[in-house]
Amino acid sequence: MSERHTLVIIVGSVREGRFGPAVASWVAEQARVHGGFDVEIVDLADVEIPLSLPAVPPKFAGDSYPRPEGMAPLTSRLEEADAFILVTPEYNHSYPASLKAAIDWHFTQWTAKPVAFVSYGGAAGGRHAVLHLENVLTELHAVTIRDGLAFPNYFTAWQDGQPLDPEASGYAKTLLDQLAWWAAALSAARDATPYPG
């Protein structure tokens, strides 16, 4: 690939004993092999993310939005990213509060950028969480990628930090190919014309 884009992979769970970092590490390796991205993992467990939000939404407050000081590195990484992969488990048929809070503290950082999903869970593989995330990210004017990765029954489907499904790398490549296409298209569009949202 001739052009590399900045990809931020977000570990969405902060629960004790979570599996997310193992999934994110594997996805990051797939993205590095793919070659279309400069890859960074952001673990929400390392970020100060209060659940209480300021009265004025970030869409309207802009650069004056009063985020906690400890959130500054996350905000900067989201701002600089050309594309995202959200790694999420499924909690009670949805996604973690930590991920919702990280999303809600921001707005323009997601706008007109592509977002792909890698989920894991029980029988559904986290697909309910992804359906909810697609609705939320659409509201923020992000572009969600159709082909995601879902790992059902991850507790028996992974070994030594690797999925046992021999097709997993191929599915990851499809996701990354689509993500790279959208990253290039949307980056060029943002450079050419301010997004009307």
Image (tube, rainbow, N blue to C red):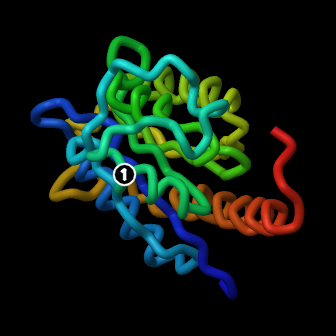
Figure check: 136 above or below 190 = above
x, y percent for residue 118: 46, 44
User: Which residue is at the front of the view, 153 or 176?
Assistant: 176
Which residue has dot 1 on it?
72
x, y percent for residue 28: 38, 64
x, y percent for residue 77: 45, 59
Q: How many marks?
A: 1
Figure check: 171 above or below 196 = below
Amino acid on which disc 1 is placed? Ala
Q: Residue at x 18, y 53 (%)?
A: 159
Whether residue 122 is visible here, answered yes or no, is no
User: Which residue is at the front of the view, 163 or 119?
Assistant: 119
Q: Quadrant of residue 110?
A: top right
- For this orientation, the residue located farthest to the top is 92
Whether residue 73 is visible here, answered yes or no, is yes
Q: Residue at x 25, y 39 (%)?
A: 48
Q: Residue at x 27, y 46 (%)?
A: 70
Figure check: 14 above or below 161 = above
- For this orientation, the residue located farthest to the bottom is 2
- For this orientation, the residue located farthest to the left is 17
Q: Quadrant of the C terminus?
A: top right
User: Which residue is at the front of the view, 167 or 134?
Assistant: 134
The answer to whether residue 120 is left or right of residue 191 is left
Q: How many C-alpha atoms fall within 10 Å of the one at disc 1: few (<14), some, or many (≥20)?
A: few
Q: Residue at x 57, y 46 (%)?
A: 63
Q: Secondary structure at mark 1?
A: helix
Q: Quadrant of the N terminus?
A: bottom right
User: Which residue is at the front of the view, 82 or 120?
Assistant: 82
x, y percent for residue 25: 29, 60
